[in-house]
Image (spheres, helix red, strand yellow):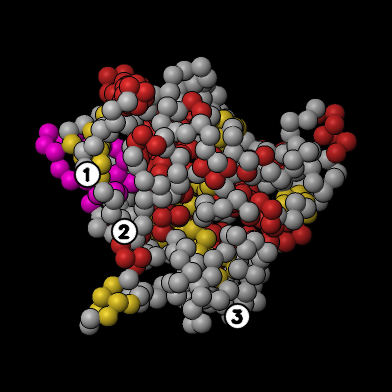
């Protein structure tokens, strides 16, 4: 089976923003390994001119499959003539248009029809959220289970994102003492890297070249979510508590958020070197530190996350704005934007109103068939009449979504199985695939950038069978085992720097108290 995959080329002044998913057409057939050029992740495909096929080269003989292939090939082909010049033109206007892309006007006029530049930027931040999954060690047989598999210096290059244009400045850790067992992963080894901590994400800043292309210095915070199961939703206590009860400043005691999210964000374990500072303290001090470094520049703060990571993104965005961590020395306020993917509700209607008053912008991209964005607050939520919500707003299980929603439908994609299960509907790669093909309500599904549909099956089984793309195809070579002196073993990993030495300085600047010396 063969399906077409036309090339898309970024001009020299704009690097490809994701995991090798923007392709250049090749004149000669050559072997393809997914992802591109990395021996750790091997898949039996090869690339021929403008196409991807199984290495065997076998084709389907049924007319039904041929018709499906033709339809899907058309969605990949159409973007070359209709979208490529427009995308390149829009890339050139990014330095002037970035404030609108970041939600200055709440994305008015940019979603219907879908603005090509907004689509590309949203996918780019989605890829940075996906990097959290790709870098996380899920294997319980690894002594490093629950940690990041790569060092900050080699983070993006190890994930085959060398042109992303960002440098990781800090890893974020959360304590595993919270009752979210499906978020935290633990090693079966008796001697493991940490018994109390899990890697929760990273902070990165755009390098000089990317800053020029973006029109500002961008600080990105990416939070890890949950990808392998949806049971974590059932783990939620579904109980609202005042956000100020855990030390986050708020002048209104009626502003409440889900208690599990709040505990995950603010809890710490002083006996653990990785999480002796809470995730909250880690992210606030790093933002403050970076704003001091780039105090003479135009700066933006973009926070991204998928699933549970989306909840942490929204909560940390609120905290940054409420605490004033986004304020420069000269009093300038730095805009805070959240690119949320498949996220749950976080707080009540008072939280929503306070977030808007602080000027935090949130774009929520969801699959309308995904169950996670429908929780918590299954019965009392923003979809009820305002009069009913007014009566119910004091209830501990009355929730409201924040920001602007972009709802997509996986049944609109000719590549995806319309009967995919709940895990497929929640998959981030699938959501980015839908985003690439979305042009507006009622518009035909056409992949604007030629993003490779094979990425969808990287961690699930969602593509239609006739593509012959194996499910869950991304895996480490030999599951991370190496051969040394004739024996197979797990390699040791370098010890990561836990917290910067100036943590206390920035905690003091932020007015946060800490018992650590």
Query: What's the CA distance linking mark 1 and mark 2?
Result: 25 Å
User: In the drawing, what numbered circle is on residue 158?
Assistant: 2
Q: Quadrant of the N terminus?
A: top left
Q: Quadrant of residue 486?
A: bottom left
* Secondary element at image label 3: loop
Above or below, 64 relative to 337: above
- Mark 1 or mark 3, whichever is nearer to me: 1
Q: Is residue 350 magenta?
A: no
Query: What's the CA distance linking mark 2 and mark 3?
Result: 31 Å
Place of residue 491 in the rendered image (x, y in percent of width and height, measured from the top left):
33, 75
* Magenta residues, start to end: 19-37
Q: Quadrant of residue 403?
A: top right
Place of residue 188 in the rendered image (x, y in percent of width and height, measured from the top left):
51, 75
Give the class, few, some or many, for how many residues have Cα within 10 Å of label 3's Cα (few <14, many ≥20).
few
The residue that mark 3 highlights is: 271
Q: Is residue 216 something that shows in the picture?
A: no
Q: Are marks 2 and 3 in contact (CB under 8 Å)?
A: no
Who is closer to the viewer here, 159 or 63? 63
Determine whether, in the image, residue 69 is placed left or right of residue 368: left
Q: Is residue 35 magenta?
A: yes
> Which comes sooner in the sequence, label 1 or label 2?
1
Place of residue 414 in the rendered image (x, y in percent of width and height, measured from the top left):
42, 27
């Amino acid at each position: 089976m063969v399906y077409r995959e036309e090339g898309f080329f970024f001009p020299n002044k704009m690097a490809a923003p994701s995991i090798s998913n923007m392709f250049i057409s090749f004149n000669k057939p050559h072997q393809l390994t997914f992802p591109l050029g990395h021996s750790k992740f091997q898949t039996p495909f090869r690339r021929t001119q403008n196409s991807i096929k199984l290495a065997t080269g076998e084709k389907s003989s049924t007319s039904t499959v041929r018709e499906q292939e033709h339809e899907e090939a058309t969605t990949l082909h159409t973007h070359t003539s209709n979208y490529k010049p427009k995308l390149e033109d829009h890339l050139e206007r990014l330095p002037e248009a970035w404030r609108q892309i970041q939600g200055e006007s709440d994305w008015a006029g940019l979603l219907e029809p879908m603005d090509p530049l907004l689509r590309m930027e949203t996918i780019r931040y989605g890829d940075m959220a996906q990097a959290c999954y790709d870098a996380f060690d899920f294997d319980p047989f690894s002594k490093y289970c629950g940690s990041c598999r790569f060092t900050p210096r080699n983070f993006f290059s190890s994930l085959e994102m060398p042109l992303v244009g960002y440098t990781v400045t800090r890893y974020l850790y959360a304590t595993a003492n919270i009752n979210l067992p499906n978020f935290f992963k633990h090693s079966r080894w008796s001697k493991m890297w940490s018994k109390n901590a899990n890697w929760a994400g990273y902070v990165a800043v755009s390098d000089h070249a990317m800053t020029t292309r973006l029109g500002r210095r961008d600080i990105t915070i990416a939070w890890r979510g949950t990808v392998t199961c949806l049971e974590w939703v059932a783990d939620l206590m579904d109980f609202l508590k005042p956000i100020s009860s855990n030390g986050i400043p708020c002048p209104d005691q009626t502003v409440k958020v889900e208690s599990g999210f709040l505990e995950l964000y603010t809890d710490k374990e002083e006996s653990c070197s990785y999480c002796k500072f809470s995730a909250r303290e880690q992210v606030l001090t790093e933002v403050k530190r970076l704003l001091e470094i780039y105090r003479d520049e135009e700066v933006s703060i973009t926070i991204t996350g998928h699933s549970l990571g989306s909840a942490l993104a929204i909560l940390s965005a609120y905290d940054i704005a409420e605490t004033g961590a986004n304020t420069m020395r000269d009093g300038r306020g730095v805009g805070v934007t959240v690119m949320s993917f498949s996220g749950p509700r976080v707080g009540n209607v008072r939280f929503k109103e306070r977030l808007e008053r602080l000027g935090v912008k949130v774009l929520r991209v969801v699959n309308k068939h995904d169950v996670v964005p429908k929780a918590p607050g299954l019965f009392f939520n923003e979809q009820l009449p305002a009069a009913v919500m007014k009566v119910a707003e004091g209830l501990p299980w009355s929730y409201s979504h924040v920001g602007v929603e972009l709802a997509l439908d996986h049944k609109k994609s000719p590549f995806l199985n319309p009967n995919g299960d709940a895990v497929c509907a929640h998959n981030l790669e699938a959501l980015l695939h839908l985003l690439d093909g979305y042009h507006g309500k009622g518009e035909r599904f056409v992949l604007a950038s030629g993003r490779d549909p094979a990425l969808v099956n990287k961690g699930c089984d969602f593509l239609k069978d006739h593509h012959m793309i194996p499910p869950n195809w991304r895996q480490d070579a030999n599951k991370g085992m190496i051969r040394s002196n004739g024996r197979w073993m797990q390699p040791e990993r370098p010890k990561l720097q836990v917290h910067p030495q100036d943590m206390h300085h920035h905690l003091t600047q932020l007015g946060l108290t800490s018992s650590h010396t």
